[in-house]
Image (spheres, helix red, strand yellow):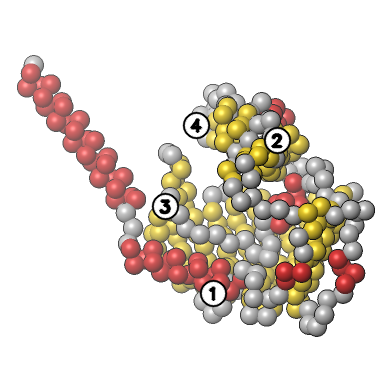
Amino acid sequence: MVRMISLLWRLAAMCCFCLWLLQSTLLAEDVRLREEAVRLLERANQVSLPGPVPNYEQVVSFRVHYPDGTTKEGSYSREAAEAAGYREEEAFGDYHAVSVRSGNRISSTVGWGEPPEMRELREQLPVHLGRFDKEDVVRSIETSNVVGRSAKCILFETQFGSTLQHNQLCMDSETGALLLWQVGDETIENLEYFKVGTLWEPARISRSLRGTLRMEIEQKISVIDGPMDPNIFTPPTSHWNKLFQCQTWRRAIGISTPQPPAGNAGTDTVDIIVTGMIRETGKTEALKIQSSPRPDLNEEALSTVSRWSFQPMICNDKLATQGADFVVHFQGR
């Protein structure tokens, strides 16, 4: 009996070792391969991130596609004059707002009623970019043809608990610009790149979630030569608010953020993103659905986040309001 137990323990230890070895093999990556992948992604950031163009005008039109088959159109524009300031105007359905920054002052008609689709749009402009982190494991870099262009594609995996994502980023072989972003459930295609100053930006952007078209974007960016029109700095409201920076800062920290009860439909998880505010009281407010693959769960997601509590943000040693995105996980639902 003692021998049998000992044998069983040895078998169990061998199994554990085999599982550890398998996991280590899955997570291992070639250092030189990752170095090249990082170089390619940094190059994509370098050729497209705004900065070298001081004065410019950006004009954007977009269309949002909803799960029920309906669509809604909107627009966004920005006139920027380097450190002097900028003017932004956005419209979506019945919503319209203008923001102007002049030096360290800002005047804006944007309020709590800003549609989450506008925030979703701005995350794509002028192009959606990113960086690798410790959860990403680079598997290979392959030459391919993407949206009609010769490209170098980075194939990598990302581990989230027990979930393993198979992802892909493709860069233009000639310019280095990002052509394709396939990460998790999100796919972004950047089409018809044009040059503005020293930068390359896409004229058309297509964003899909779980294989379904979510947003189509068209943009134009042009350099403004010579002095800017001073009228762009006219405040859209009757007053200015002074901008300030947090010299001391701490983000909001969750105290109680319980997730909805699990269902009995397996282990698959549906994530719904809620956008809103964390107030000085630590309570959530102005909650809206930002992204949802299951509209039937939207009300429960909003109700769930409304009950969450936080230690509020601290700015300059005082409690402050913070905008935030909240992810609600529905497992087996």
Position of residue 79 in the picture relative to residue 319 (left or right): right
Question: Who comes first in sequence, dot 4 or dot 2?
Answer: 4
The correct choice, above or below, for 233 with respect to 99 in the image is below
Q: Position of residue 198 (x, y in %)?
A: 63, 80
Question: Who comes first in sequence, dot 1 or dot 4?
Answer: 1
Question: Who comes first in sequence, dot 3 or dot 2?
Answer: 3
Q: Residues within 10 Å of mark 3 (few under 14, many from 20)?
A: few
Q: Position of residue 112 (x, y in %)?
A: 80, 42
Which residue in the structure is indicated by mark 4?
A: 267
Question: Who comes first in sequence, dot 4 or dot 3?
Answer: 3
At numbered mark 3, what does the secondary structure look like: helix, strand or loop?
loop
Point 89% across, 53% down: residue = 239
- Could you give the CA–CA distance between mark 1 and mark 3, rounded to whole angstroms? 23 Å
At numbered mark 2, what does the secondary structure look like: helix, strand or loop?
loop
Q: Residues within 10 Å of mark 4 (few under 14, many from 20)?
A: few
Three-letter residue code for mark 1: Gly
Which of the labelled discs sits on residue 176, or is there none?
1
Position of residue 233 in the picture relative to residue 9 (left or right): right
**Residue 289, located in which quarter of the rendered image?**
top right
Which of the labelled discs sits on residue 261, or is there none?
none
Which residue in the structure is indicated by mark 2?
A: 279
Visible residue check, residue 296: no
Three-letter residue code for mark 3: Lys
Point 60% across, 56% down: residue = 187
Camera-nearest residue between 294 and 28: 28
Q: Position of residue 40 (x, y in %)?
A: 48, 70
- Could you give the CA–CA distance between mark 2 and mark 1, rounded to whole angstroms? 42 Å
Position of residue 234 in the picture relative to residue 62 (left or right): right
- Could you give the CA–CA distance between mark 3 and mark 2, rounded to whole angstroms? 32 Å
Which residue in the structure is indicated by mark 3?
A: 134
The correct choice, above or below, for 152 with respect to 184 in the image is below
